[in-house]
């Protein structure tokens, strides 16, 4: 089994910054994609940003230029640097990772979520 543990959420004022981290642990052969998603109250979960094993990134239009995703493959960790935060960024942020436990066994796992609240 793969466990994803997120950290770094909290309360921040509009215009502020936060950095989220997500570490994957378990008997992992390889990790392909890692990413961040968010879910605001009453809304569906949506993609924020993803990063492939080769470093290729993808961002939701609403966060381009403000958020930056990165990963440390040696630590099986993905980060999300969030700058110029807006009240509409308030949500529970979830980490996701997919890859292989063994040659024959894929995985696709989610973290428990971390709350980000942007408010004055």
Image (spheres, rainbow, N blue to C red):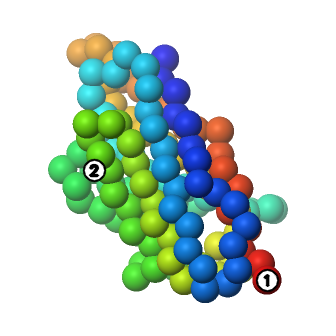
Q: Can residue 61 be seen in this view?
A: no
Q: Is residue 62 above or below residue 41?
A: below
Relative height, residue 41 to residue 111 (above, below): below
In the rendered structure, the answer to whether residue 64 lies left or right of residue 40 reads left
Relative depth, front residue between 8 and 27 = 8
- Which SS class for mark 2? loop
Who comes first in sequence, dot 2 or dot 1?
2
Q: Residue 52 carries which label?
A: 2
Which one is nearer the viewer's eye here, 92 or 45?
92
The residue positioned farthest toward the left in the image shown: 54
Residue 36 at x, y percent in the picture = 50, 54
Tell me what residue is drawn at x 44 percent, y 33 percent: 24
| Left or right: 47 in relation to 93 | left
Q: Residues within 10 Å of mark 1 (few under 14, many from 20)?
A: few
Q: Position of residue 8 (x, y in %)?
A: 59, 54
Q: Visible in this render: residue 10?
A: yes
Residue that appears at 18% across and 50% down: 54
**In the rendered image, the vertical position of residue 22 relative to residue 98, given as above or below:** below
Q: Which of the 4 image quarters holds residue 74?
A: top left
Residue 112 drawn at (x, y percent):
65, 39
Which numbered tag is attached to residue 120? Answer: 1
Q: Which residue is drawn at 60% across and 80% down?
A: 16
Badge 2 crowding class, 10 Å Cα cut-off, few under 14, some 14 to 19, many 20 or more, is: some
């Amino acid at each position: 089994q793969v466990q994803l543990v997120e950290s770094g959420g909290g309360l921040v004022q509009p215009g502020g910054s936060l950095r989220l981290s997500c570490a994957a642990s378990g008997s992992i052969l390889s990790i392909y994609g890692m990413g961040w998603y968010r879910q605001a109250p009453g809304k569906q979960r949506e993609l924020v940003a993803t990063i492939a094993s080769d470093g290729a990134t993808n961002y939701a239009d609403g966060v381009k230029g403000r958020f930056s995703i990165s990963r440390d493959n040696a630590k099986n960790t993905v980060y999300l640097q969030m700058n110029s935060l807006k009240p509409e960024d308030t949500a529970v942020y979830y980490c996701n990772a997919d890859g292989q436990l063994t040659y024959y066994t894929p995985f696709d796992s989610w973290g428990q979520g971390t709350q980000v609240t942007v408010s004055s």
